[in-house]
DNA sequence: GCATTAACCACAG
DNA sequence: CTGTGGTTAATGC
C-alpha cells in the first residue's frame, strides 16, 4: 500500500488504513503528463510515491512555475481542500507514481485521527514558510540571485548532488524565476565563463558552490 | 549624462 | 530548443 510510506499515514491504525486503501488509486505518469489541471473540479488529494512534479499556475500575464516537488510528498492539498476547482496544474517532470485519495476519505481521516491531522498541518506549515521565503526572494533579488537560489535548491533539496540534469528547459526556468529565456541563457554562459558552473545541455555541475551561494545571498 | 539590469525582437544553429 | 547580438526602457549614481 503506497500510502504507508507517508509520514502522516504512520499514525493511522489498521481500520483507518483499510479505509484509506479502499479509497485510493495508484497511477503512473510519464514525463510531461498532466496529473491535474488548473480550473477543473478537483476531488482528490494526491500522494507522490516516486518521481518529480512541477506546479504551474496561469497568471494574469504569463504562466508561472510555483514549485518543483519531489516524492515522497502530498500535492494538491491546498487546491483540493481550499476550493472546488484547482488553482494550479501539476505536470510530471520525470516518470512519476502517484496515489489518488478521495477527498471525502481524506477528510474522514483528518477527523478520525489527530496524529494524522497533525502531520498534515506540519507539512502545510513548512510549505507556507517556504512560499513566504520564495516570495521575498522573487521580489527583492535580481535575476542572478534568483537563479543561483534555485540552482542550489535543485542541488541540495532535489538531487542531493552538485551534478544533475535540469528538470526544466530554459523557458521554464524563466517561468520559475520570473525572467526571460534569453536572460537565463546569458546567465548560464556567464556563470560557466566564471567557472562557477559547468553546463552541457541539461547537465549542470556546480563547480564553485561558495561563489554561487554568494550570488544567491547578495541577490 | 552615464552605467547597469534585464526584457523584447530577430536570426541562426 | 538555445545562444547571441542589437535595441530599448527603467533605475540609480
Image: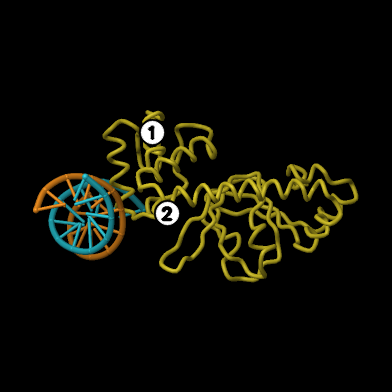
Chain colours: A yellow, B orange, C cyan
Residue A215 location, x and y as percent?
A: 37, 37
Residue in view at x 51 percent, y 59 percent? A56
Mark 1, residues whose alpha carbon is within 10 Å: few (<14), some, or many (≥20)? few
Residue at position x 65%, y 59% from top?
Answer: A78
- Chain containing mark 2: A
Above or below, A170 relative to A64 = above
x and y percentages locating residue A80 in the rendered image: 67, 63
Left or right: where does residue A50 sit relative to residue A67? right
Which quadrant holds residue A205? top left
Q: Is residue A86 above or below residue A214?
A: below
The circle on residue A214 is 1
Nearest-to-viewer mark from 2 and 1: 1
- Locate the C terminus of chain A and report the quarter of the image it occupies: top left
Residue A145 in picture, x, y percent from top left: 38, 43
x and y, in percent, of residue A82 in the image: 67, 64
Q: Is label 2 on the same chain as label 1?
A: yes
Q: Nearer the viewer, residue A185 or B4?
A: B4
Q: CA–CA distance between discs 2 and 1?
A: 24 Å
Q: Secondary structure at mark 2?
A: helix
The label shown at residue A172 is 2
* Residue found 82% across the figure and 55% down from its top: A109
Left or right: A44 as drawn, with respect to A108: left
Q: Callout 1: residue from which chain?
A: A
**How crowded is the residue under tag 2: few (<14 C-alpha within 10 Å), some, or many (20+)?**
some
Cβ–Cβ under 8 Å for marks 2 and 1: no
Is residue A8 left or right of A36 when viewed as pictured? right
Q: Secondary structure at mark 1?
A: helix
Amino acid at each position: 500500500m503506497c500510502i504507508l510510506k507517508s509520514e502522516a499515514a504512520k499514525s493511522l491504525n489498521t481500520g483507518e488504513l483499510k479505509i484509506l486503501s479502499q479509497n485510493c488509486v495508484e497511477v503512473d505518469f510519464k514525463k510531461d503528463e498532466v496529473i491535474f489541471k488548473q480550473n477543473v473540479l478537483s476531488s482528490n488529494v494526491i500522494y507522490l510515491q516516486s518521481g518529480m512534479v512541477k506546479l504551474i499556475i496561469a497568471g494574469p500575464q504569463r504562466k508561472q512555475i510555483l514549485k518543483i516537488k519531489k516524492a515522497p510528498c502530498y500535492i494538491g492539498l491546498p487546491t483540493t481542500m481550499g476550493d472546488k476547482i484547482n488553482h494550479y496544474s501539476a505536470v510530471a517532470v520525470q516518470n512519476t507514481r502517484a496515489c489518488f485519495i478521495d477527498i471525502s476519505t481524506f477528510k474522514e481521516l483528518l477527523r478520525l485521527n489527530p496524529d494524522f491531522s497533525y502531520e498534515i498541518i506540519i507539512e502545510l506549515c513548512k510549505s507556507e514558510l517556504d512560499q513566504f521565503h520564495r516570495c521575498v526572494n522573487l521580489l527583492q533579488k535580481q535575476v542572478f540571485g534568483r537563479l543561483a537560489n534555485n540552482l542550489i535548491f535543485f542541488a541540495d533539496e532535489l538531487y542531493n548532488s552538485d551534478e544533475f540534469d535540469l528538470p526544466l528547459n530554459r523557458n521554464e526556468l524563466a517561468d520559475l524565476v520570473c525572467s526571460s529565456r534569453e536572460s537565463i541563457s546569458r546567465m548560464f554562459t556567464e556563470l560557466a565563463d566564471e567557472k562557477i558552473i559547468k553546463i552541457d545541455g541539461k547537465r549542470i555541475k556546480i563547480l564553485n558552490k561558495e561563489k554561487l551561494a554568494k550570488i544567491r545571498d547578495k541577490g
